[in-house]
């Protein structure tokens, strides 16, 4: 499982170009920063109030005034800038974030996203997720293709929406899919899987790109 | 110059049962602990609390409750308006047993609703939440072909603010990631109490030291401490 997540994170990292501003969600999306190609430096936005997020703070060397949006003590880059929440989300909604990477419970072929209410579980709240997926120029969903075999990529989301028509790209351990006006287009297929296998793991029609490529591994 | 310097107890003395209070902070970082402690000691009930989240419970910090969590643990809150409440199990518990109402607002919209109140705006139009359950009961307005939600202003009786540096007029700055909601909240409440780590005489520091004008400050309380991990 750890290897699959690393595969997804490393493929996601290839979507970035030098100088991009990105917001990475908690969990697998955070791992993307560890796999950036040589020479690609991105500016990480932390929605609780800064650009220039770096790694986790070393135990005993924490600055108690510097946390990430999950509340963990982190470090910042030399070019970091700190701001308040109004500015932070002006950056988000204003189109100043090139890409956000998040997980999902469900994505559908219209690019609709559901990732904030888990059925039967306590509602945690959307935090900044609704703003991020509406505001970022590109929304990348990086996740395992299914939830223990249950479809997550669907014809229509069944859970309450986070936002409508916002998802641009879906990256899983099985492949890379683009959300296009005509539906979900499979652009890359991982060599570990066949077309039949990825189709079976997907809850909507998968349009096979005429120039389908193997999903690259590092 | 009006003397705004108070003790923490004096600064929260006007908070009464049923009031709406804003509390700065993000999972406790940037929350004015000495004001919250004084409010818990005073022991008011039925508050509506506006903040990013429910603070951090002692189980999460490993020491004591932090930020808004102290008010929740003391049973002082009837209604919380926040963007994320998953880190404090007391909120889910309160929602389940009916003792606590919780209104969830997207983080960026929450900041803008508060900013609107402080800036004299009738609300803001945001694309966030269009087509979701957040849009229920709200007006959707089309501007140049794109849908936006009308998010109305959110104000409070009191704002409890945490500054890193403040002068005796109330000009203040919050360090690094402690800014979060503190700046917008300081403009959106009838009474604004600021707890500060460092307190300076007026004119002692260059005016550029301070991000926020002291005109927003009602009371200033020194002695706020850095959080101890």
Image (tube, coloured by chain):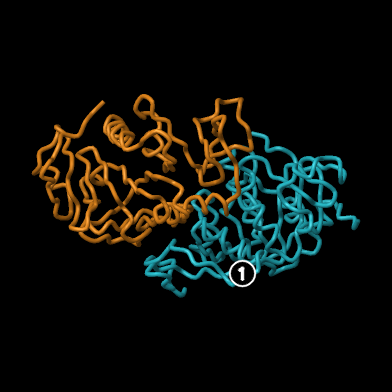
Q: In the picture shown, does residue A153 fall above or below B50?
A: above
Image coordinates for residue B96, horizontal then vertical, percent: 48, 62
- Which residue has dot 1 on it? B121
Residue at 47 percent of width and 73 percent of height: B138
Image coordinates for residue A73, horizontal then vertical, percent: 56, 35
Residue at 33 percent of width and 49 percent of height: A104
Q: Colour of chain A?
A: orange
Image coordinates for residue A81, horizontal then vertical, percent: 58, 39
Where, by quadrant of the figure, is residue A174 drawn? top left
Q: Colour of chain B?
A: cyan
Residue at 43 percent of width and 41 percent of height: A22
Q: In the picture shown, does residue A184 fall above or below B130?
A: above
Q: Is residue A91 left or right of residue B154?
A: left
State the residue in front, A118 or B204: B204
Q: Quadrant of the C terminus of chain A?
A: top left
Q: Is disc 1 placed on a helix, strand or loop? A: loop
Residue at 72 percent of width and 68 percent of height: B17
Q: Is residue B205 left or right of residue A49?
A: right
Q: How many marks?
A: 1
């Amino acid at each position: 499982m750890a290897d699959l997540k690393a595969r997804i994170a490393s493929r996601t990292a290839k979507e970035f170009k030098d100088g991009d501003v990105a917001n990475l969600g908690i969990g697998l999306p955070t791992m993307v920063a560890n796999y950036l190609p040589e020479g690609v430096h991105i500016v990480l936005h932390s929605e609780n109030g800064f650009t220039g997020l770096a790694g986790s703070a070393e135990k005993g060397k924490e600055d108690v005034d510097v946390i990430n949006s999950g509340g963990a003590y982190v470090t910042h880059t030399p070019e970091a800038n700190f701001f308040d929440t109004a500015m932070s989300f002006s950056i988000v909604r204003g189109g100043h974030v090139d890409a956000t990477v998040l997980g999902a419970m469900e994505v559908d072929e219209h690019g609709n996203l559901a990732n904030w209410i888990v059925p039967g579980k306590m509602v945690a709240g959307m935090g900044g997720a609704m703003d991020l997926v509406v505001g970022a120029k590109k929304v990348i969903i990086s996740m395992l293709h299914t939830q223990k075999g249950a479809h997550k990529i669907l014809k229509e989301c069944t859970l309450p929406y986070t936002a409508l028509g916002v998802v641009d790209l879906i990256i899983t351990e099985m492949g890379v899919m683009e959300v296009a006006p005509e539906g979900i287009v499979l652009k890359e297929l991982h060599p570990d899987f066949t077309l039949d296998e990825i189709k079976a793991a997907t809850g909507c029609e998968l349009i096979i790109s005429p120039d389908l490529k193997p999903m690259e591994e590092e | 110059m009006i003397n705004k310097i108070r003790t923490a107890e004096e600064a929260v003395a006007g908070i009464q049962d049923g009031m709406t209070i804003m509390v700065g902070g993000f999972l406790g970082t940037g929350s004015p602990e000495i004001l919250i402690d004084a409010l818990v000691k005073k022991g008011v009930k039925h508050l509506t609390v506006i903040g990013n989240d429910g603070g951090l419970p002692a189980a999460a910090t490993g020491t004591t409750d932090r930020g808004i969590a102290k008010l929740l643990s003391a049973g002082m809150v009837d209604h919380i308006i926040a963007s994320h409440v998953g880190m404090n199990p007391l909120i889910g518990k309160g929602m389940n047993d009916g003792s606590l109402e919780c209104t969830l607002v997207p983080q960026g919209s929450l900041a803008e609703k508060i900013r609107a109140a402080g800036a004299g705006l009738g609300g803001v139009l945001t694309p966030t939440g269009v087509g979701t359950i957040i849009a229920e009961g709200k007006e959707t307005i089309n501007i140049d072909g794109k849908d936006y939600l009308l998010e109305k202003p959110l104000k409070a009786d009191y704002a409890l603010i945490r500054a890193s540096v403040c002068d005796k007029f109330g000009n203040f700055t919050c360090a690094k990631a402690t800014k979060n909601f503190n700046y917008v909240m300081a403009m959106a409440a009838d009474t604004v109490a600021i707890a500060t780590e460092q307190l300076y005489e007026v004119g002692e520091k260059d005016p550029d030291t301070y991000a926020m004008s002291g005109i927003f400050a009602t009371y200033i309380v020194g002695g706020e401490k850095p959080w101890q991990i």
